[in-house]
Structure formats: C-alpha cells, structure tokens
C-alpha cells in the first residue's frame, strides 16, 4: 500500500528483507525493483532482477515470468508510467 502511495523509500528495507527470504519468488523482487526505481536507484533495481534471474536459472532451470521480464524492460527504458 505504501508503495502505491509514493512512499517507496520507506518500504525498500522491508521489501529487500522479504526478497532475500524468498529468493525464488518474483513478487517481492518485483516490488523491490519498483520501489528502487521510483527512489531513483535504477541500477539497484536492475541488479535485483539479475539476481532473481540467476537464482531461478540455477535452482529451477527457468527464466522469470513474462511479467517480471516486462518490468525489467520497462525499468531499462525508464518508462514514465512506472513513476507512480
């Protein structure tokens, strides 16, 4: 909820912890990526995706879902629709 209210800086720590505890789940990683991107930390957001992708490939032999790949692509393009 705070992420949708523009309070992205407040949620980064909690999202990072959630993502670390769930290295194969895309939802916490996607929300962390979005929060980082909105906080002006684009390179960190892209790194989160790369880590998720590496874990998925190593552990499951699978790529991130289309939704995860789309978010990554939109962050790469600095899609203004991701701003809020």
Image (cartoon, grey):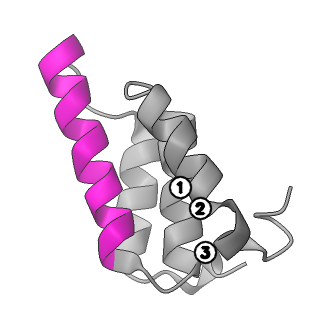
* Sooner in the amino-acid sequence: mark 3 or mark 2: 2
Q: Secondary structure at mark 3?
A: helix
Is 48 magenta? The answer is: yes
> Is residue 10 rendered to the left or right of residue 22?
right
Instruction: Residue 48: name its quadrant.
Output: bottom left
Q: For the N terminus, which image quadrant?
A: bottom right
Comparing 84 with 42, the one in front is 42
Residues at marks 1 and 2, CA–CA distance in whole angstroms: 6 Å
Q: What residue sits right under mark 3 in the picture?
A: 82
Q: Residues within 10 Å of mark 2 (few under 14, many from 20)?
A: some
Question: Relative to 16, does residue 80 appear above or below in the rendering?
Answer: below
**Mark 3 or mark 2: which is in front?**
2
Which circle marks residue 12 in the picture?
A: 2
Which circle marks residue 83 in the picture?
A: none
Q: Position of residue 80 (x, y in %)?
A: 57, 86
Q: Which residues are magenta?
A: 43-61
Q: Secondary structure at mark 1?
A: helix
Q: Secondary structure at mark 2?
A: helix
Comparing 20 with 34, the one in front is 20
> Residue at left 43%, top 45%?
68
Which circle marks residue 32 in the picture?
A: 1
* Sooner in the amino-acid sequence: mark 1 or mark 2: 2
Question: Relative to 63, does residue 69 appear above or below in the rendering?
Answer: below
Is 53 magenta? The answer is: yes
Question: Relative to 15, does residue 22 appear above or below in the rendering?
Answer: above
Q: Residues within 10 Å of mark 3 (few under 14, many from 20)?
A: few
Residues at marks 1 and 3, CA–CA distance in whole angstroms: 13 Å
Name the residue at the top extreme.
60
Secondary structure, magenta segment, majority class: helix
> Residue at left 34%, top 69%?
44
Q: Position of residue 40 (x, y in %)?
A: 49, 86
> Is residue 51 rendered to the left or right of residue 31?
left
């Amino acid at each position: 909820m705070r992420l949708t209210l523009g309070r992205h800086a407040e949620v980064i720590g909690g999202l990072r912890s959630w993502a670390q505890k769930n290295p194969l789940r895309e939802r916490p990683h996607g929300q962390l990526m979005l929060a980082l991107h909105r906080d002006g930390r684009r390179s960190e957001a892209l790194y989160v995706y790369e880590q998720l992708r590496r874990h998925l490939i190593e552990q499951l032999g699978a790529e991130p879902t289309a939704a995860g790949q789309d978010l990554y692509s939109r962050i790469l393009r600095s899609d203004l629709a991701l701003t809020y």
